[in-house]
Every structure is written in structure tokens, then in C-alpha cells.
Image (cartoon, grey):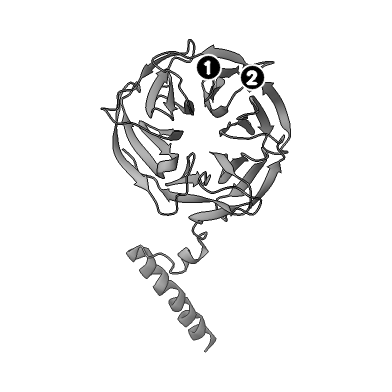
Amino acid sequence: MRPAIRKTAFRALIVPLAAALLLGAQPAQATAHQPAHKPAAFPLPDGFQPEGIAIGPGPHAYFGSRATGDVYRADLRTGEGSVISKGPGTPTLGLKTDGRGRLFAAGGTGGDARVIDLRTGAVLKSYRLATGAAFVNDVILMGDAAYFTDSANPVLYKLPLGRGGALPAEAVTIPLTGAIQYATGNNANGIAPSPDRRSLLIVQSNTGKLFEADPATGVTTEVDLGGETLTNGDGLLLSGRTLYAVQNRLNTIAVIALSRDGSSGRIVSRITDPRFDVPTTVAAFGDRLYLPNARFTTPPTPETTYGVVAVQRVSS
């Protein structure tokens, strides 16, 4: 009887296998091992007062504190995180990471910029950008340089990077001239590259205007938005020729289709969400946009809660 047993066992194995191959069947349990969905919202430390966000490398987001300048890192797969770099007691606002494991941070009223090691949290170099009143608000990396906006002074600050991304000894100040005119309130705020990477896009919060700036000379021209404005414009994010512009106190993201050179564009949609509570800026990971809720309309206390929300990315 033993040969019969082997034959039966062989047939029991080969028949379903052949059927699976013919039908292109997939194992029913394959999806059981897929990772859980990333959280669509997660908390930041109480009293943190978030402002900036940068994502990457990998599924990690970085947030700066207006209160202390601390930098918090969160895992987007779980929403869990911790402070990786203690601040100087002055704000950390706009943030950008590079491919060398560094975080470039705008120092707000501290009038400075810092470059932080993502692995250790150590400050690799700090730059004094302004000696008087200043509000160093946002930062972008384009080409071989980092550029910072100042909402109080009509200038850009440039960190020209050397060979291998070497940090410079000091920053270069570039006056902003041309179409942009500073007035009372928050002026140049969010910054992003143009689609062709030849100019910088800057939103002026108090006027709602969007400008192109020559990164070499600082000469600005207004971007034609067909009569639309970006009032309370804050963080900017460019993806292809789509520009996402956060309008913080309006709890809105304007989605703008830009021309190739960035000289004109049109608002094709606006993203709103009941979970928005004065979001300041935006970064992308996968098919989602992530925004920290700054809660400017809520008086801050050490117990005030803060968090991050994710919404589906919409293209132009």
C-alpha cells in the first residue's frame, strides 16, 4: 500500500499547484503581511508649537518648534517620534533635508540658520544672518545652495555649498528688488524652486502675491495668477509643475498649475479639511501631503495639544 500513498500525496500536491499556475492565482493570505496603513493624523508633544516640516530620507518627518527651537522626528508609518535635537531657545521654522543626512533650519526671530546632523542631532554649523530685527522664515535647497527668506527684511540669505556639499564659512545676503514691496506684516514667506529650476518662487503673506526671484541678483517679478491671490500664503511645495501653497489662517491649500518657467499659473483647486487648525506648511510622502497644525488662533500653553494631519495629494 505504500506506493499508493505516495501517488495520492503527489496528486494532492500537484493538482492545486497546476491550477494556480494556469489561472494566475495568488495566495489568499498575501495581503495579511502587508504593512498597516500609515496614520492620517498623529500628535506632536504638548506645547511644541510646530511650524516647519521636512520629509525624508525615508518615511521620516521633521518638525521645528517655535517655542524652543527643538527638532522632532516622527515615523510616518506609525506616527511615533521623539526630539532629536534640542533648540537654542529661539524658533526653528522652515526646514529642508538634503541627501547628505543634514537638516537646514530657518531661525525666525533668532535671525539665524542652522545645519543639523540628522543622525546625531548635533548642530554642524550655525550662521548669524541678521543682527537687527529679523524673521528668517523658510528655506529651500536649489542647485548648489540653500536660500532663506526673511519676512521682516527684503533680502534672501544664501549658503553657497562647496564641493561635496561642503558648508560655507558664512552666508551671502542678496537684496530683493523689483516687483516685491515690503509692507507691514509678514512679507516674503514660503519659498520653492520654479519648475525649470532657474528661479525661486516666493509668496508674500500680507499681499497674497507670488513672485519669481532671480537667485543670483534678487530681482523679482510678479507671477501672473490671473487675478487670484494667496492671502496668508505660507509654506510652498513644488511637485513637477504643480505648486501647493498653504494659506494658513484660511485653512486651505491652493493647488496651482504653473507654466514651465514659473512666470504664470492658475489655481485649479483648493484643498480644505475640517482637521486643519491653521496649518503652516506642507511636505509630501507617497500620495499624501502632511501639514503641521500651528494653531495660531489658540493661545499657547505648555499643555496645548498639537498635531499633524495628512490629506490626499491632488495634482494639477
Residue 198 seen: no
How far apart are the two marked residues, 1 and 2, measured between alpha carbons? 13 Å
Q: Quadrant of residue 116?
A: top right
Please provide percent x and percent y for residue 182. 46, 20
Q: In which quarter of the image is residue 171?
A: top right
Question: Mark 1, mark 2: which one is toward the viewer?
Answer: 2
Q: Which mark is residue 278?
A: none
Amino acid at pointer 1: Val
- The crowd level at tag 1 (other Cα within 10 Å; few <14, some 14-19, many 20+) is some
**Residue 33 in the image: above or below residue 5:** above
Quadrant where the C terminus sits is top left
Amino acid at pointer 2: Gly
Task: Quickly name the residue at label 1.
Answer: 155
Residue shown at the point (43%, 27%) measured from the top left = 204
**Residue 97 in the image: above or below residue 8:** above
Q: Residue 132 carries which label?
A: 2
**Residue 244 in the image: above or below residue 26:** above
User: Seen in the image, is 101 located left or right of residue 227?
Assistant: right
Q: Which residue, as the protein is rendered here, is positioned at the far bottom?
A: 1
Please provide percent x and percent y for residue 276. 45, 50
Secondary element at image label 1: strand
Please provide percent x and percent y for residue 264. 30, 24
Please provide percent x and percent y for residue 158. 57, 18
